[in-house]
Every structure is written in C-alpha cells, then in structure tokens.
Image (tube, helix red, strand yellow):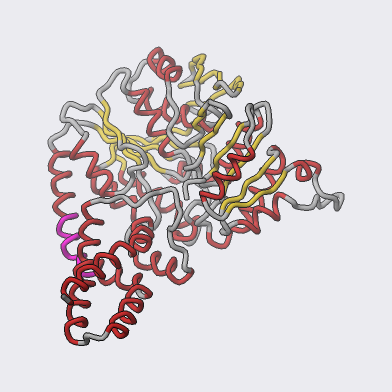
Amino acid sequence: MFALYALLVAIALSGLSYIFVKTFQLENYRLANYFQKVKKFDFSFGRKTPLVFTNRIKRLFFCIFLLDFCVFLLFFGLIPNFWVNFALTILIFIFSPIWVTLAFLCTLPIENLIKQNFVKKAKKKLSKCSCKTIAITGSYGKTSTKNILFQLLREEFDVCATPKSFNTPMGVCKTILEDLKETDDFFVVEFGARRVGDIEKLANLVGVDFGIITPIGNCHLETFGSLENLENTKFELCEGAKDLVVFSGKSKSSKKLFDRFERKKYLVGEDGSFAYAKDISTSPEGSAFTLVLDGKSLKCRTRLLGRASIDNIVEAAAMAHLLGESDFDIVRAVEKLTSTPHRLELLKGFVNVIDDSYNSNLDGFKEALSVLSSFCGRKIVVSPGIVELGKAQFETNRLAGQEVAKCADIFLIMNETNKDALTEGATSVDGKSGEKKESAKKCQLLFAKTREEQKKILKDLLKSGDTVLFENNMK
C-alpha cells in the first residue's frame, strides 16, 4: 500500500513542479539565472510564453518523478507515520526549485550526449548542401530583417530560414535537420546571444558566408554586463564572415563595428550610404518610400507599419541586391511583404490591435508609439515595460513612461516589475515649468497584476474604434 501512496505523491509533486521547470526553461537552463529567479521568488506563474514540452523537458519531468518516487518509497516504507511523511512531502515541495536542479544535474550527462549527436548530424547534413549562409544579428530587428530577407530572396532563389525566433544552437540545428534542402541556394540564420561567446558558437556551427548587423543597443545588459561586451559579441559574426557584411547605420554601436571591420563591408540606412530610404510617408495602412540602392532610386510601397520596418527592408534589400536579385523583384517582393508575428503586427476588428509584444527595447517602444499616434480614436497602451537592462532598467522605463503619456489616452501597466518607473515617467514633472505635462494629464493610468486581470479590464474598457498597442507584453 505504501508503494501506491509513494506513486501518487510523486505524481502530484512532479505536476506541481511545473512552474519551476517552466522558469528553468525560460532561463535557457542556466543555473545562475534560475537561482536569481528563485532568490527573488520570480517564477513564471502567469506568463504568456507556455512551457514547451520538448523531449528534454519530458526527460527532466521523468527524472523529477523518479527522484520523488524513490524518496517517498523509502520513507513510507521505513517510517509508516502519516504526520512524518506529510511533513516530508511539504518539505520537498518547499525545496522544489532545488529538486528541479538535482534532476537537471542527473540528466545533464545524457543531455550533453544527445546535444553533441544532434549538432553532429546537423553539421553532416549542412556539409552536403551547397547553400550559402546569411547570418543576422544585432539588438533590434533581427527576426523581422530575417523574415523580410527570406521573402525577398525567394522571388528568385530557393531559400531556407530559421522560423520564428529560433536563434540558439539547438534551434538552428533543428531547422537544418527538418527544413533545409540540399537544393537550397541560401540559408538565412538569426544569431541570438545573451553572453559573450554565444555568437561565436553559432558561427562555428553553421559557418557564415554573408552577415547583417542590425542596430545595436542596451538589450540584455543584465547578462552582458556592459555595452562593450555586447558589441564584442555581435562582432563575433563579422570575424567569422567569409565574404561580406552589411551594417546598419541606425545605431552608434553598429557604425562602430562597421569602422572596426576591415574586410568587404557596406553601410546602409544613412543618407548617402550604399542603401537608404527617403521621401517616406507612413499611415495606418502601411508606408511608401523611395529606396536608394547602390545609386538607383526605386519607388516602393509596403503594408508593414512604421519607420523601423523600412529600416529592416533597407538592410534586407541591400543584401538581396548584393546577392544578385533584380531591382524589379526586390520592389515586387517589398509590396507583398507580410508582417512578422508579434512585431508591429496590425490586427483589425472591433478594435485595432497593434501587436508588438515581442519588442523589448526603448527605440522600438518609441517607434510603436509613433505608429499608434497615427490612428484615430482612443489610444491604449498595454505593457510591462522593458526588462533585462540591469542598472539602466529604472531610467529606461521612466523614459518609456514619458513617451507613453505623450500619445496614449490610457496606459495599462502590467505586473509589478517596472510599475514604479513607468508610473513616475507617465506622471513626470516638466523640469522647465515645474508643472505636470499636459500630455500626462490626459493619460489615465491603470494597473493589472495578472493576465486575467488585464483581460477583464480591457473587456470593460474597450469601445469600437479604439486602438490597443501591446508592447513587450509576452510575459
């Protein structure tokens, strides 16, 4: 009978460890990051990003169950006392974060062997393909630029690109094994990084023929430690590039890397550079602009929203041109472009929804607010602010709050993380007059602790004709 009790308790505790396992997965299985969350009791209870039940997660859950079952089987058999065993059950639940870590360490040797085999298979398949690899990295616009370049190149070439935000070694390997064909001309890969050396690993994995450096700013400073470390990490792509690299001129850091790179390179985005946009007009329906590409002017229209989207188009169009795509096909592809999900994606209905929930930087926040301001009717912003900025987080979110107050009628702040900074910014005092800004007076501030509370507030609040911006609202 005690074996059955041990089985039932082990199953129950394994299920209750869900929130800890989810947090561990969101921290990319990094123990240091995970224990920082544990220390702050910052677990992923109600976040939008769900636990992905990969084979690795299934093995981790099985190991947690096995550890629970063995411990309870031993104690229930040796000490058949209800209260002692009840106390043990509560104790193990309290220390579940450590229990998850123990299970992780037990499965780590197996996971490393599986990972090595996975990488070996991907490299073997890639070696049989004649495609050229185009790697894209930066702080902002990586995924959107990758998707735009994919849509441009497929007008004339066979192309494979990493899906969604697949930008880690395992995500890239998965794409190679499942999607890459031997007949593909180009493999477009997004390189993500949270620490120095991350991009070098990806470059060594797939090789880099061509590179694109999008704008670089203060993202993930909490893990990089400094902007200099972030710049050096992005430069790891350049060091591995065999042919040429396109650099965005839209940030000081990307221009700094352009000056530092000593091989074949092209600067884009600045007036007079290899490629840039002029005569720009934007609206809630999209944008029109002149693309100046290698000295030629091309009239373009796109359904994508905002000037940031045009910057991404310029970077992608420059690379497509350098790879031999015709001007006619570039213009045609730009007109057909579809938005990247959750990145200034417009959803029309009872209310207009601007889904920018995967954005996580101040410049992108400002651009999304600029797009919002072009709509008629009430303007509502829903956001938890910007995270992973270390010491710069409070000031960055205070500035974001100020920007929201300039154009929004209602600002719904999500969760406690940046509540004080966003509120201070949205109600800040004008340093010149000592009086509250007129814009801030018009902006109503609301607060929701959970996603369920957010949904209820919006349900009661929204009216036909409203426009809602969800900004960095994925958590």
Work out which residue is located at the far right of the displayed protein and give it.
433
Q: Residue at x 23, y 47 (%)?
A: 205
Residue 107 percent across, percent down from the top left: 20, 65
Q: In the image, 386: left or right of 129?
A: right
Location of residue 150 with respect to 209 vertically, above or below: above
Q: Residue 126, percent across and down?
A: 17, 39
Q: Report the front residue among 388 and 450.
A: 450
Residue 211 on image: x %, y %: 36, 37
Q: Quadrant of residue 161?
A: top left
Tell which of 204 and 333 is nearer to you. Answer: 333
**Helix, strand or loop: magenta stretch:** helix
Q: Quadrant of residue 320?
A: top left
Residue 242, placed above or below residue 112: above
Q: Does 112 lie within the magenta span?
A: yes
Horizontal relation, residue 377 to residue 164: left or right: right
Q: Which residues are magenta?
A: 105-115
Q: Residue at 47% x, 64% y: name it.
A: 42
Residue drawn at the location 19% of the way across and 54% of the way down:
115
